[in-house]
Amino acid sequence: MAVAELGAVVLDCRDPRALAGFYAGLLGGTVEGEGDWIDLRLPGGRVLSFQAAPGHVPPAWPAPDRSQQAHLDLTVTDLDASERAALELGATPLDTEDRTRAFRVYADPAGHPFCLCAC
C-alpha cells in the first residue's frame, strides 16, 4: 500500500517563469503562479514545478564534481523534429557523439539535463 502520491517534480532555477515557459513549449500544458514558485500543469494531470533559487548553480553533465542529481526523460515520436523544437526553445545539446541511440541529451536554459527519448 502506498503511503503517498507524487504531487510534483520541482526544479530549482534562477527564473521560474522562463523555465516553465521552456517546458511548456516542449510538453504543452498551462503555466500557473507568480513569483518564486511556478507550476506547469501538464495534460493528464501531472505537475512540473519551478522554484526560485537565486544561487542556483547548474549541474554539469557528465561531471562527478557537479552531479546532475536528477534528469527528465521526455518521450517523443520523432527525435529529429523534437530536437529542432527543443533547440529553438533554448535547449543546449550535451551529447552529440552518437546519433544512432534512441535518446539525445540536452540542458534546459537553467542547465538541468534532460533527454529526448524515442518511443
Image: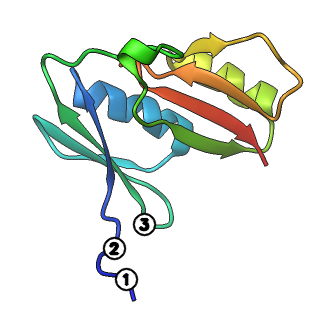
First in sequence, mark 3 or 1: give its number: 1
Where residue 5 sits in the image (x, y, percent)?
Answer: 33, 73
- Residue placed at 69% from the left, 20% from the top? 84
Q: What residue type is labelled 2?
A: Glu
SS at mark 3 in the image: loop
Query: Gap between marks 3 and 1, in whole Å?
Result: 19 Å
The image quarter containing residue 20 is top left
First in sequence, mark 2 or 3: give its number: 2
Tell me the crowding category of disc 3: few under 14, some 14 to 19, or many 20 or more residues within 10 angstroms, Cα based.
few
SS at mark 2 in the image: loop
- Residue placed at 78% from the left, 31% from the top? 79
- Disc 3 vs disc 1: Cβ atoms closer than 8 Å? no
- Residue tagged 3: 45
Query: Considering only vertical position in the picture, is 106 above or below 47?
Result: above
Query: Considering only vertical position in the picture, is 95 above or below 70?
Result: above
Instruction: Kindly report which numbered mark, 2 or 1, lies closer to the viewer in this rendering.
Output: 1
SS at mark 1 in the image: loop
